Amino acid sequence: MNNSIIPETLKKVVEEISQLPGYGEKSAQRLAVNILNIPRGEALKLIKTFMEMLEKIHPCRQCGIYTEEELCPVCRDENRDKTIICVVEESFDAFAIERTGKYNGLYHVIGGRLSPLEEITPEDLNIESLLKRVEENPVKEVILATNPTVEGEATASYIHNLLKNKKIIVSRIGYGLPFGAVLENADDFTLSKALEHKTPI
Ligand SMILES: [Zn+2]
């Protein structure tokens, strides 16, 4: 944005928002203007909520799900099956699977997907900690529940390769989920089916 009539602070906000993954200049402009358009009190309340979130929320020490505690409710739950780990890209994927009520194992949030375009490499993801968990705990099965997208598939097969010599079952969800779908947007029925029809790979 080189236009000199754009206020400096607005320019700065748009620049900063467009650094976020998934935001281009246009969507950054829209977000900035939307915030300017709502009543000031509401906008400040929103920013306060953001600050509170940043203060309180961090990844679970064990699985990486965003939580306000040291360990998330899933990791704290004694009744969960600790021999199964479901690998997801983001916390919201785990929240979506939880909503189905059909899964009783643990999770591992890798924090994204491999993407050569965005220069996201295995080192940028929580894959090392997954391998460590598998080695140090009595894990029998790892379900790869990365999104059925090009990047999600590449990520799943990368992790599969790392796990295939270990004595565990590695399975992949996918049945019923259309290619290109994003887990957190899938309806509960489709997601339940996808979990039910996971296949060993
Ligand atoms: Zn956890």
Image: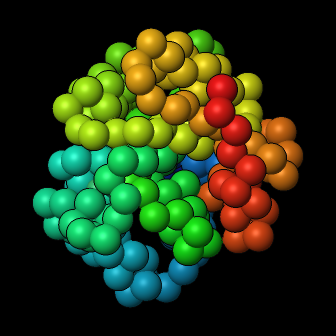
Quadrant assignment, res 184: bottom right
Q: Which of the four quarters of the rendered structure image does ligand 1 lie in? A: bottom left
Question: Residue at point 45% right, 13% down?
Answer: 165
Question: Residue at point 50% right, 22% down?
Answer: 159
Q: In which quarter of the image is the N terminus?
A: top right
Residue nearest the observer in this picture, 53 or 145: 145
Quadrant assignment, res 100: bottom right
Task: Give x and y (percent) for residue 167.
Answer: 41, 23
Question: Residue at point 48% right, 38% down?
Answer: 142
Residue nearest the observer in this picture, 172 or 183: 172
Question: Residue at point 23% right, 38% down?
Answer: 137
Q: In this view, does 145 lie above or below 44?
A: above
Residue 102 shows in the view: yes
**64 left or right of 187?**
left
Task: Give x and y (percent) for residue 179.
Answer: 83, 39
Specify the color scheme.
rainbow
